[in-house]
Image (cartoon, rainbow, N blue to C red):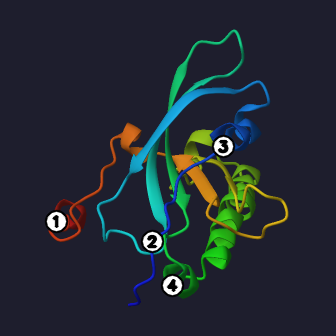
Amino acid sequence: MNNEKLKTIELRELQPILSRTFGDQLIVVRYTTKSLLQPGENYGSTIFDVHAVIRRDDEAEEEDLYLVAKMPPPTEFQRKIFDSPYSFRKEIFMYEGILPNYKQLERDAGLKEDELFDILPKYYQSRLSLSPDVDFDDNAVILMENLKTRGYYICDRVKGSVKSLV
C-alpha cells in the first residue's frame, strides 16, 4: 500500500438530506457521529453510527433517530480500488430504483404490506456531493436505519458466529 495521507471524513449538513424524507418542516436539533466499525472492518467505505435528535416541525416533540451513514473511504487509493463513485451510484440505484419496484411487484401480485420481502434497512436518502457542480466528493453519503435498534449486532469477524450456521 502507499503512504497516502488519510482524509478526515465527517458527516455534514444532515438536515437538508433528511428533509427529503421527512419534509421541509424538519428540524435537526443536534446529532453526533462515531465510527460504527473497528479499524480494518471495512475497506470500501467509512461507516458512522449517527444519533440525531429531530423535530418534525416547530410544534413537534423531539425524537431520536438512529442512523448509519455510509461515506467514502478515507484515501484516494481505496476510492480508486473500489471505484467509489460507481459503487455509491449502484447502491443508491438499488435503494431508489430496484427495491421500490420490487415491492410494487409484490403488491401487484397480491401480497400484503407485512408479507413483503423486507431484508434491507430503511433508506433515508443519499447524496454524492454537497455541491451540484461536483460529481462525487468527501460529502457523499447513504443514510439508512441503524439495525441495532431492532436487536441486530455486529459479530467479531475473527471469531465468527456459529449460531447463524445452525
In space, the residues marked 1 and 2 are separated at their CA atoms by 35 Å
Answer whether residue 32 is visible to the viewer in this image: yes
Q: Position of residue 150 (x, y in %)?
A: 39, 39
Q: Which residue is mark 1?
A: 162
Q: Amino acid at mark 2?
A: Leu
The x and y percentages for residue 108 are 76, 52
Secondary structure, mark 1, is: loop
Residue 141 or 10: which is nearer the viewer?
A: 10
The residue singled out by tag 4 in the image is 77
Residue in view at x 64 percent, y 58 percent: 139
Q: Residues within 10 Å of mark 1 (few under 14, many from 20)?
A: few
Neighbour tally class for label 4: few under 14, some 14-19, many 20 plus, Cα within 10 Å: some
Q: Residue reaching furthest bottom?
A: 1
Mark 3 and mark 2: Cα distance apart in space? 22 Å
Q: Earlier in the sequence, mark 3 or mark 2?
A: 2
The reply to whether the C-beta atoms of the residues labelled 1 and 3 are less than 8 Å apart is: no
Query: As drawn, is 41 to the left or to the right of 19?
Result: left
Q: Dot 3, crowdedness within 10 Å: few (<14), some or many (≥20)?
A: few
Which one is in front, 160 or 2? Answer: 2
Q: Position of residue 7 (x, y in %)?
A: 50, 67
Q: Of circles 1 and 2, which is in front?
A: 2
Say which element carries label 4.
helix
Contact (Cβ within 8 Å) of mark 3 with mark 4:
no
Amino acid at dot 3: Glu
Mark 2: give few (<14), some (14-19) or many (20+) Cα within 10 Å: few
Type of amino acid under label 4: Phe
Residue 52 seen in render: no
Which residue was labeled with disc 3? 13
Q: Earlier in the sequence, mark 1 or mark 2?
A: 2
